[in-house]
Image (cartoon, grey):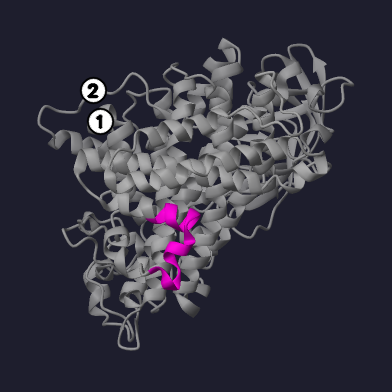
Amino acid sequence: MEVHRMSTRVERGSNGEPHEPQPNGTHAGTLDANERRAAGPVRGFRPPVITEPGSAKGSRVGPEGIDFGLFGSGNDIHWYDTDLTMQHYVQRYLGELREWGEPRLRAMAEYAAGDMDRRARHTDREGQPRLVRYDKDGRDVSEIWYNEGYLATVAAGYGSGVVGLRYSPHDPGTGPVADAVRRAWQERAGGPPPAPDKVPFFYTQLLHMLMSMSEIGFTCPVTLTMSVAFVLEQFASPEQQRQYIPRLAATDPARLQQGGTFLTEIEGGSDVGAITTVAVPAGDHYLLTGEKWFTSNADAEIALVLARVGDVPGTAGLGLFVVPRTLPDGTRNRLTIRRLKDKLGTRAVPSGEIELHGAVGYPVGDLRRGFRYMAEALNVSRMCTATGSLALSRRAFLEAAVYTSRRIAFGRPLAEFGMVRQTLLDMITDIEAGWALAARMMLAFDRLYTYGTPRPHDELRRRQLLAMAKYRLSENGVIHARQALELHGGNGYVEDYVTARLLRDAQVNTVWEGASNIMALEVVKGLAREAAQAQQAPAPGRQAPESFLIGDVREALSRVTDQGLTEAAGVVAAQIPGINADIARVLTSPPDVQNALARRLPDKLTDLYSAAHLLEEAQYSLDTTGSTRLAAVARYYVDRTYRPQQLDIQGGHVPALDLFDVAVRYARS
């Protein structure tokens, strides 16, 4: 097979990677930090002290908190060492893995903020994937060209074990992140700590989040590869598992085969039951014919494809197939990439239109349950979309905090103005509430599929929390990216700053793997399913039985005992009767009314669930560290959501001034 390379009009360094033009006309790849500082201050800005993306120098969190004005940009801050929120969740839920797992998180933070982020900028602007449809002899090869920097990101990202650790916890990995982990263990007295027998999704999602702060165009293929591996782990034959999972989970780029999920067709979109691709039996395999309208990671070596088997209409007639890009005899399978989509954002991942011309596919499990199997791939993708959105919010917050701390207007930094402080406070409050929600989603996933210790209702709980988190956090990602751009003023609107890319990339999460309307409907359907399972479907005028989600809220609030939090907990508890009434109203309404109300109910339920669990996390923080920061944020979240009059002009409390240092700058309280 020929190797295709397309020329790009960018300068190249000794390693073949691009030197990217910077706003001042220099190149990030050619000047070190001292040289950039020597270039002189920029008028209207406070001169930064730390301008080394991914450097451990950006790990400063002193008693006075983080002085964001010390940094040149959001990726000069250490993305793990200064993220006390991520560390809180590592301590509480991954404490047994902390000694083993923290060096990898720290190494990933440094790599993602440095080399990965630099390459992401180039890929987005000059190095986008390109379809090579034909070779020089006119043969259809349907190959995709990637720039060398992106290929280095692929090798390092998968080499970190973001997918592979679930299947091979003892695999040390390859590439710069794995090398940094080995160095950390060599310096550790007693050598490396023992690897765990099982690595939970909660942990690999943290690696995924750190990469998503840099390049969600790359974490999209990671998500798809993770999804395909999970479906095969759960439903494929032992032979298929032995054949495909080691390739999907490989940390060695020479062995790695990435995954993809091909389901969307032009006839249906979210209406999966409208799929027209057909599968015809041919011995030990099937031949698939049809078109897929939107396929991300379009050149995936191992794709899961939904196709219709027989004449059964709707989703009941869909089977799931493994469609390898390369057949066992080394020949190319009969599928072509018609074109790549010209997208608003996430330009690093090639999304294309696929034609299957009798492509060989191998059935997965029971062909009558294909849609259910693919739904599990979507569930993993929705988890990654939710956590990736939360990570993007964090990046947007860091960029906004740094810029407003450096930018001088009217004689002082923007971050000293109350309106700017209010925006930053609201951003970090949303992020803290998002963590409380996302953590419960990941915990439910792991109880079911990592540890085998499910609680009652955990299967439905997982599905509900996936929908709630994906809905809320992806919407928040867009809001926070826009707010960060606005706080940059005109500079935020130009591509020299990362804010424009963040906004373009954030938008995909509201539509990928189920748009926000679909997520809202999922929550309502889950509530109806729960009522039906209890055989107590509410009749008009009679209140629905209390959902287990409300039970979760009550349980979380019961753990809140600190006097500084119990009033807020009481405010949250007071919302429960109204939410129960809302659930009953929606579930007993005619379909058109139910559909019209379908977004308002998940909004209310997500507010309630997030508030209760944020208060619980604040209680844990008080009990274990004595820090009152999270308690202050949780009280503010409750007031903002349920008692806005407390924050009104006559309320006497000005959160932007009273809470800024503690909540935004992490000053010790």
Question: Which x, y percent locates residue 284?
Answer: 73, 12
Q: Which mark is residue 59?
A: none
Instruction: Please report the bounds of the magenta region as a residue range.
Output: 636-651
Q: Which residue is mark 1?
A: 100
What's under tag 1, amino acid-wise? Trp
Residue at (40, 53) in percent of width and height: 116
What's under tag 2, amino acid-wise? Pro
Say if residue 502 shows up in the picture. no
Among the 4 quarters of the image, the one containing residue 25: bottom left
Q: Is residue 402 left or right of residue 217?
A: left
Q: Are marks 2 and 1 in contact (CB under 8 Å)?
A: yes
Closest to the observer: 655 or 218? 655
Assign a secondary structure to mark 2. loop
Q: Is 231 one of the magenta-colored residues?
A: no
Residue at (69, 40) in percent of width and height: 521
Question: Which x, y percent locates residue 428?
Answer: 39, 57
